Amino acid sequence: MTTDYRLRALENPTAVLQELHRAHSTSDNFPRSISQHFQSLFSNENTFRKIPSLDVKRPPEVHHDRALVRFRAMVQDTSLSTEMYLSRFPDGSCGGWGIYGTESGGSSSPQVDYANLQECSVLWATSVPAESNWCATELDGPIPDDTQSNSASEFVLRRAHKYPHTEFNHVGVQVKIYDKGDIETFKSTDVVTFVGILSTESCSLDQTGTGSPSDAPTLHVLFTRSHTPTIISRPFPRLERIVLEPHAISADSTQLSERLAQDNSQVREQLISWIADEALGGDRVVAEWVLLSCIARVQSRHPPLLPPSLTVSRFPPPPTTPSNAPTRPLPLPTLSTILRLLLPLTHTLPLSLDALNKSRFTPESKDEDLHSGILQVPQGTVLLISEGGVGEGQLLERGVMNVRALQDVMKGQTLPYIFPFSQFSFPTDIGCIVLSEGRKSTFFKTDLNVPLTAPTTTSGIARLYKPPNEVVLPSADKLAIFRDLVVGARCGKVQVAETTSEHIQSEFVRERQGNRSLTADDLIRWMTVSKLYALSLHEPSLSVETWQRAKAFDDQRRVSVA
């Protein structure tokens, strides 16, 4: 297809849609034809990126009416009522995708052929919660300066209750899907890029209320792109990076080659050292456990092979501020900044009794409108939970429910959705790292516990909470390699060779003969840790040597908390 035709689709997608309808008006499934046509038109990544992005920095207000946009979003609510639309007007012109009678010439005739009534699915989608800035930049490209300056003054926050983290700006959009093949595809917390025509329409969420419906940004979908649980992908095993411009300092100065990297162990050690030095007071053992937790994910639900939750105990609370100083929010652990620099999806949850008693952790339906909860995040998110703000006081009913919901996520990777007369649990995939001042978590039972060799001086504790601008960053090229290792490991799979399996079984039998307290749970934990250890080294097969190193590493942890 010619560049001019793509340009027309970018500038006036409605005109292209109407032309296609005239050419394919007898199609049995015109919406599917539209999806395939536009998907083919923008199949090349370079041409796809020319579609303007819809996000916080480029909100609906900066796009013209019926603009073609792409919206990478999390599906928040699929319970919106389906809608009927007239797929063909009496004059034969195209209906749907926000095209109504006044736009179709003689289509204002009251005569309606009910055979032309079709159904479209409606859902609510939001900006992707917990998405890191570097991930968004990699997927969307840089923001033009003029767009960024205009968006700040024109941004309008709508229906904040449908976004899990209300402290952040976000875009919420009513999404209408016409292709029947996609109608049953999307589930809550799925990350999808919707490409379609942006308009403003009355919101179907308001149809059940007593007041008049309010308008909402509405995206009429032409086609969609799904995403992996990590949103972006990296090769496993890791590939070498080629330096394109030796003197450039931007992350774009390298690209992946086709050669397997041979320095995974060295890069892993460098990454552990950076995490330890910048966020954990130099404790390399805890940094290594944090790394393993960051790459863990749900491997299987039947049987359950779930990411182990981790408590970093003996983690000092933030330094106290003078009583005469102005009240400010408690600083976040520096580890929060490190995780945002490494992971595509991560969120920090600072706990306090006030937050537990007043916040909503689980989605809850009110007046047929699903209000989001803090834990309604995409699968693949790593959650950093800080207990540094927890003081004395009483945990109320809502607080107890919130603690139970987060414990359910850690234990079984399920999250309850609350409805007026019932509740249902839906699968999640959320890694959990808890920072606790005591010997164990105040509220949660985690699979693993490792104590921090914590600094005791005021300045040492303050460095555990230093702001992002004080974090010493590696070079852009080195940071890109760190991300390759972490994200690639999250995408990878480790096989256990027969010889390794026989060695593990023999060793477990031998150790159990000398220690009758060992159970199958210990074997499962060792297998989980050893596979994560192999993933962190980008080894697709678990060797006997890696098994022994991982088991010794876990044995060392158990001694430290005994």
Image (cartoon, grey):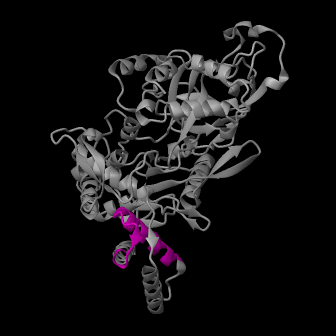
Q: Position of residue 562 (x, y in %)?
A: 40, 75
Q: Position of residue 26 (x, y in %)?
A: 73, 26
Residue at the limit of the structure toward the bottom, as seen here: 513
Q: Nearer the viewer, residue 23 or 45?
A: 23
Q: Which quadrant of the view contains residue 546?
A: bottom left
Question: Would you say 211 lies left or right of 76 here?
Answer: right
Up/down of 483 relative to 539, above or below: above
Residue 436 can be seen, yes or no: no
Q: Based on the picture, tell me whether residue 295 belongs to the magenta stretch.
A: no
Q: Position of residue 184 (x, y in %)?
A: 69, 42
Q: What span is in magenta?
A: 521-546
Question: Would you say 449 lies left or right of 20 here?
Answer: left
Residue 185 can be seen, yes or no: yes
Q: Which quadrant of the view contains residue 304?
A: bottom right
Question: Would you say 503 lies left or right of 123 here?
Answer: left
What's the residue at 53%, 58% (across, down)? 410
What's the residue at 37%, 73% (across, down)? 550
Q: Nearer the viewer, residue 525 or 267?
A: 267
Q: Nearer the viewer, residue 234 or 428?
A: 234
What's the residue at 25%, 51% (across, down)? 278
What's the residue at 51%, 25% (across, down)? 69
Q: Which quadrant of the view contains residue 254?
A: top left
Q: Based on the picture, tell me whether residue 544 belongs to the magenta stretch.
A: yes
Q: Report the predominant secondary structure element of the magenta stretch.
A: helix
